[in-house]
Amino acid sequence: MLQNAHRLGHHRWLCLQLFEALGTHVAATSDPTVKPVLAAHAHHLAWHAELLAQRFPELDELDAATLTVPADAAVEQQVALLRRAPTTDELLYSTYRVVLPRLLADCSEQLAEVDALTDGPTARVLTLIVRDLADDVRMGEVLLRQGGPLG
């Protein structure tokens, strides 16, 4: 149960970081194609973070702040690089080819390991998140193909 909670916390941390990064870029970009996609995906990520927090166990020694931490230094570095992306193309590349696919893979792996009989609510939340992330990655790929040299 604790390992499951920690993994959910790692996913939640990444969702919150991406929500902030994409939301910041929405305000900064004027590209009429990119702006609504990033805004929608930022909202998905905020909602996913809420759903994940609802699946945390209620234990005295664990709270949302304790669980909501990066999985490792590599993911923290990927988010830092994404936040510093100097162009929209680089932000899209980092988001849709590096960070979101990692989150999708991690959530998919956890979903495969969750017992739907004993933890059905977590399985449902992860199923929803995996579907949304897969759709968002596909949409990001469309943006990248339409874009500049990184696509």
Image (cartoon, rainbow, N blue to C red):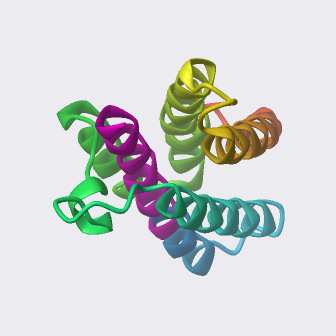
Nearest the camera: 68 or 33? 68
Residue 49 shows in the view: yes
In this view, 83 is above or below 40: above
Position of 51 with respect to 86 (left or right) is right
Q: Residue at x 37, y 50 (%)?
A: 9
Residue 48 falls within the magenta-colored stretch: no
Q: Residue at x 73, y 43 (%)?
A: 124
Where residue 44 sits, quadrant-wise, is bottom right
Magenta part of the chain: 1-20
Q: Quadrant of the C terminus?
A: top right
Q: Position of residue 42 (x, y in %)?
A: 63, 65
Position of 53 with respect to 108 (left or right) is left
Q: Main secondary structure of the magenta part?
A: helix
Q: Residue at x 56, y 72 (%)?
A: 23
Nearest the camera: 12 or 82? 12
Q: Position of residue 146 (x, y in %)?
A: 82, 39
Residue 19 falls within the magenta-colored stretch: yes
Nearest the camera: 117 or 141? 117
Q: Quadrant of the N terminus?
A: top left
